[in-house]
Amino acid sequence: MAREGLVIPPRPSNLPPDARYVASPTPHWRQGAEEPGSGQPVGVQTYWTPHGEPIRYERYDLRGRLLSRRSSHTPDPIVTWATRFREEPDRFDWYAYRDRYDDEADAALFAVARDGTAEHRLSYAQALVWLDQRRGRTRAITIPRHDRIRALFEVQPPASATALRDADTFGFTAFALDAMITLGDDAGLRTWGPPWLEIGAPPRPRDRFPDEIRPRVERALAGEPPSDPIARAQRQLGRFLWPVLGAPGTTPALLVDDRERAYWLDGDTIEAVSLEVDATGPSVVPSITAVGPLMSRSLVAAPGRGAWLQQRYRHGLYLFGLSRSKASLKVEPAVDLVVRCPDDAWTDRLIALFDRVRPFADEPTEHHRWDRIYNADRDHVHARGAPRLGVSAPVTAGTLAAFDAAEHDLLVRGCYLANLVPA
């Protein structure tokens, strides 16, 4: 049903039945799915003018992040990308697509590597490792690189042990063995590890791969268990795990896999748990707006060292931590996630862990002396500006209520917390 006062023009005959009219900020017709509750676009979005002329196409991932935008007269960027990779595997510019790589793009390039040469497969494996190492705080964890590399190796294994002497085959097999060790594929490791070790050094200097792969293969073939508790958990579960809270080996830890399914690691005990974890930056926006009203907030601040913000929404938690990096001396995000818990017990457990792993000494709670800096994902047309929001002293129930209302409005508009600064 149309809103009162909204005048909808006649529907152009060339539009699909599910295209809907959007009146502001610029009138247009639009087709595409949205995440319930938040309005974040997901999947392919198609736009037309009020008269039915095509405007553009946009493609979003499952977290609502824009991956590509093109006018109706330009070719599909994924097709162009795959064509370039097919033609020049060794010179393909992966850097330009660092923050635009998702499952659909990976499927296209996987197909090129599968049907191409050993050079394509080596370039693909190197690129996945490179992209994984440079994933930013706001990069969705969607590409299980170890799974993809091992799957590609199984589709196109070397014809024989002597084929490993080819430079590209040797290099790609190195990455495949690393994936087998990570995922606990002992059968594949025993088959290809010994002949790969017999080859010696890589045939060409440019086919370098991480130095630690060779000793990892040697230790794995000797039956030595990995010293890292996360590595042991990965081999036990057969999947790559990403720590988002805790210090594995020292404290319990909350881990997620490539789809952000949650696991609880305590010592050498790893179990899947019924927590809904969102650790991908701007995508925390719909998570926060969906968990209900704010119940409590605390901010522990260590001047010059960082800040540790916790917000509780009944069984929902928003945890945001800043800490000064010893390497760069910059205060950078260390924790940034939303967790939906099934009950009070899990909520209290995560709050206790979040407090335990704070990297600086206890400080008094001073949330009224710190401002929040909110950024907007520039790819979302409904998110505007980079506002600054703070609570001024003296803090009263009225000022806190106004602050909460303003903060909620920013989240609904598509903004997300990016920094905390002294007021």
Image (tube, grey):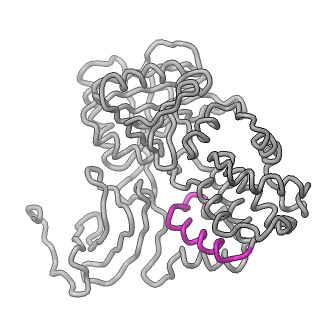
Q: Residue at x 68, y 69 (%)?
A: 156
Q: Residue at x 35, y 35 (%)?
A: 340
Q: Residue at x 75, y 42 (%)?
A: 220
**x and y percent of residue 94 in the render?**
66, 64
In magenta segment, residue 176: no
Residue 33 vs 237, above or below: the answer is below
Please identify the quarter of the rendering in which residue 249 is found: top right
Report the quarter where the N terminus lies: bottom left
The one nearer the camera, 207 or 148, is 148
Q: Residue at x 79, y 49 (%)?
A: 210
In magenta segment, residue 113: yes
Residue 398 vs 155, above or below: the answer is above
Residue 328 vs 282, above or below: the answer is above
Residue 402 visible in the shown view: yes
The mark tally for this picture is 0
**x and y percent of residue 250 in the render?**
61, 21
Outermost residue, bottom side: 13
Magenta span: predominant SS is helix
**x and y percent of residue 77 in the render?**
53, 75
The one nearer the camera, 222 or 379, is 222
The one nearer the camera, 387 or 331, is 331
Residue 90 visible in the shown view: no
**x and y percent of residue 390 in the render?**
39, 30
| Magenta stretch in the rendered image | 98-117
229 sits left or right of 13 in the view: right
Please identify the quarter of the rendering in which residue 40 is found: bottom left
